[in-house]
Amino acid sequence: GHVRLSVIDQSNSGRQPMSNDGRFWIIFNGEIYNYLDIKNQLLQKNHRFYSKTDTEVILNAYKEWGTKCFEKFNGDWIIIILDKKKNEIIISRDPIGCKFCYIYEDEHNIAFSSEIKGFMGINKNLNFDEKNLGINESTLYAFSKTIFKYVTQLPHGRFIIINLETYKKTLSKWWFPLENLPSIHPNYEVNQADYYELLYEATKLRLNADLKIGTSLSGGIDSSVIFTILNIIKKNEKNLDDKKLDLNPIIMDYSDCKTTQEAINISNHYNRSYTKINSPNYNINKLSELFSKLEVIEEYFRQPLLYEKQKELGIHISIDGHGADEFLGKPSYFPYLALNNYNQMVNLKLITSNIKAYK
């Protein structure tokens, strides 16, 4: 089963599962932001396209480069490809793990889903795994575990191949951060300029969509930076469609928010008309409903209200920032950043072999 948010190419040509040759079929959750560059490379190699989607670009890229194609993608994704000739399924996850991919496996079934609740079609009584109860969720995430029996996560920067005849599973690592380290200059101003350029280009890439794009403001570091860059891009890029990019932000105000006034100030600075919404007081039933939808317990649990308001205003895509306030603003979060998001920097096989050699 697949439910599509048609960000690029809203025609029926983008429906999934998708195939353009009958052999390879794809289900895709996410977005490849540099898909146009890759599409041009594939056109030069005589690949044909029947849609304007990034999904079909992935499909043809896999035909051309195999699993090496993942290294070419700039985006957030879970990619599932069925090869009917080899009778195998390939599942790939983006380098940072922005998109969720849960895998359910018991003695009778192997299944995968972007939400744990999807597995209730197989097992209506998902049971807790007592070994994992009480463990911090970020720790479970770092080790690709969940609180449920038979349910794990595909680690970020990995792909798994499942042979549909033998059910043999092969897990491989495709993303090696040590091979993709950013350049760091001894001059602070040069680093500052490079960092700005990265943020500018990353934000600009995300403006390629066939739906209306909006944003939100909390007054914190991340949302304020992205809001500022969006306004600079709007000023610099004259070809941007005003009907497609709405920079009048949504501001969510709640009782313990200390930055609402900062959000209002920066909105006024760029002469934008903001919409302020108040977060209601949640009772236990409402919280339970929210956590069931999100499946994670984190500080972003108010976001569904914000997105509901954006949808009312005709906005279907929201360019937001999550995490920079903590990772870039609070030294106490650095260990979490290092252990969780970048723990792949250690090649465990290499470390193990070195230990044996040392012994």
Image (cartoon, rainbow, N blue to C red):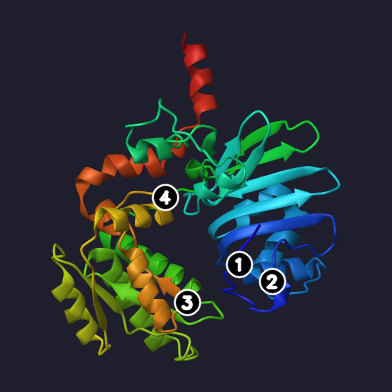
Quick one: label 2 or label 1, which is nearer the N terminus? 1
Q: Which residue is mark 3?
A: 316
Q: Residue at x 41, y 42 (%)?
A: 342
| As drawn, 57 above or below 115 | below
The amino acid pointed to by label 4 is: Glu
Q: Amino acid at mark 2?
A: Gly
Q: Nearer the observer, disc 4 or disc 3?
A: 4
Q: Which residue is mark 1?
A: 4
Q: Looking at the image, is mark 1 or mark 4 earlier in the sequence?
A: 1
Q: Are the two marked residues, 1 and 3, in contact with CB atoms closer than 8 angstroms?
A: no
Image location (x, y in percent) of residue 88 = 77, 42
Res. 67 mark: none
Q: Which residue is mark 2?
A: 14
Q: Earlier in the sequence, mark 1 or mark 3?
A: 1
Q: Residue at x 71, y 76 (%)?
A: 12
Residue 223 placement: quadrant:
bottom left
| Side of 241 relative to 328 (left or right) | right
